[in-house]
Image (spheres, helix red, strand yellow):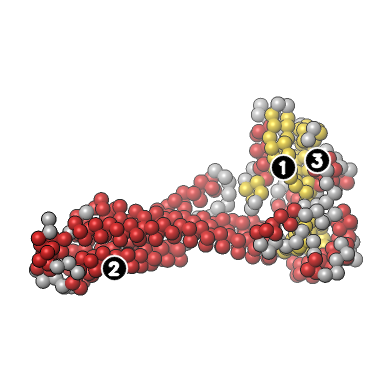
Amino acid sequence: MSLRYTLKTSITGLKTHKSRSILTILGIVIGITSIILVMSLGQGAQNLILGQIQNIGPKIISVIPGRQPKGPTDIFSMFADSLKQKDLEALNNKGNVPHADKIMPIVFGSQSLAYGSDTYRANLFGVTDFFAELYDMYPDRGRIFDDDEVKSYANVVVIGSKIEEQLFTNGEDALNQKIKIKGMNFKVVGILPKKGQFSFLNFDEAAIIPYTTAQQYIFGIKYFNRLVIQTDSEKNVNATAEDIKITLRNSHNITDPSKDDFFIETQAEAMQTVGTITSVLTLFLTAIAAISLLVGGVGIMNIMLVSVTERTREIGLRKALGATEKNILFQFLLEAVILTALGGIIGIILGALFSFLISLILTKVLSLSWAFTFPVEGALLGLGVAALIGLVFGIYPARKAAAKDPIEALRYE
């Protein structure tokens, strides 16, 4: 019996029982759709974050308090209080870090902002005027506070566009108005343009004040959550990172590098870390989604077994007309592979469609620079796995069909 005839027979058998065929491939469709969706969104998120980190510039070095996390249990060490004013002064000394161009301390937390009877809980950042240059986030209206205001602990604030919308509900211009933060009046000197999410930050919901004011009056702390350092040249990044380590170890009286209570991260290292995290997370979620393929395979085997029972007379008739066990085996096996391959194709189309729609929503609604990414390797892998599942889980029903006795099959009611 030719392959062409067997293929035609298999397709005819599937068309005859359309409802059963659709139910058979449902698990495969869901599994492949999930895999394509997870891989596409994972790649999109990775591209977005890496692009934003890259935009900050290669000359930036971050100093983070606490030990460098080497596992999930170490994450809390990042909230240590090891970076103090004496460290900032030591790093500002050109004799210690000659290639440091600008240094910005950062403190942050969540605080309620109020204007009249309206309140809004925002992410509050204490920084210097270098913040605007670092993130290319200059006020759309008004100005950023200057160095004199940082040194004088000034009560000035730059707010995000959403904060203005939430606090000034009557349409009043927020510029030069006074809002309350922790019971203190702060003059609004600038309003940031609407930008949406930037990496892990949403500047539309952020309030920016001098770090000195944040330390003294808002958070009541004597340490920094971060130190951001810009080098005078990209080629001096590694040398500057080493100078920072030596300076902070001397400041903290650390002689054993394994006892460091801080760690340093360049932009290249940050990109590598983020890339690793997003890749592992995507792989983990893809593995979870792939479980549905196994469930779909079991479903295919069960329904194919039912199909074999229902088509017993057909099998007996074909054998009586000269079909061999090999012909029957190949027909039912081909049906299983066709079903799973069809499910794989539908799943790829649906996964790509849903990924595109989500990317469009994230771009239009959340104002993210989210580019749609179609995971070609995921599609090929999904299609291959789907066909393999059809082959593996179709063997047992196909063997049962091929092993039926033709006389007994013809007598079957």
Image position of 386 (left or right of 212):
left
Kind of residue at badge 1: Ser
The quarter of the image holding the N terminus is bottom left
Q: Residue at x 19, y 69 (%)?
A: 403
Image side of residue 294 versus residue 337, left or right = right
What residue did someone put label 3 on? Answer: 218
Q: At which x and y percent is residue 108? A: 75, 47
Percent x, y of residue 95:
90, 66
**Which residue position is annotated with label 2?**
395
Say if residue 61 shows up in the picture: no
The residue singled out by tag 1 in the image is 110
Mark 1 neighbour class, 10 Å CA radius: few under 14, some 14 to 19, many 20 or more? few
The residue shown at (83%, 46%) is 221
Relative to residue 21, is residue 152 drawn left or right? Answer: right
Image position, residue 125 (x, y; %): 75, 46
Q: Earlier in the sequence, mark 2 or mark 3?
A: 3
Check disc 2 and give the amino acid type: Ile
Name the residue rendered at 30%, 55% in the picture.
Answer: 24
Q: Earlier in the sequence, mark 3 or mark 1?
A: 1
**Residue 203 in sight:** yes
Q: Earlier in the sequence, mark 1 or mark 2?
A: 1
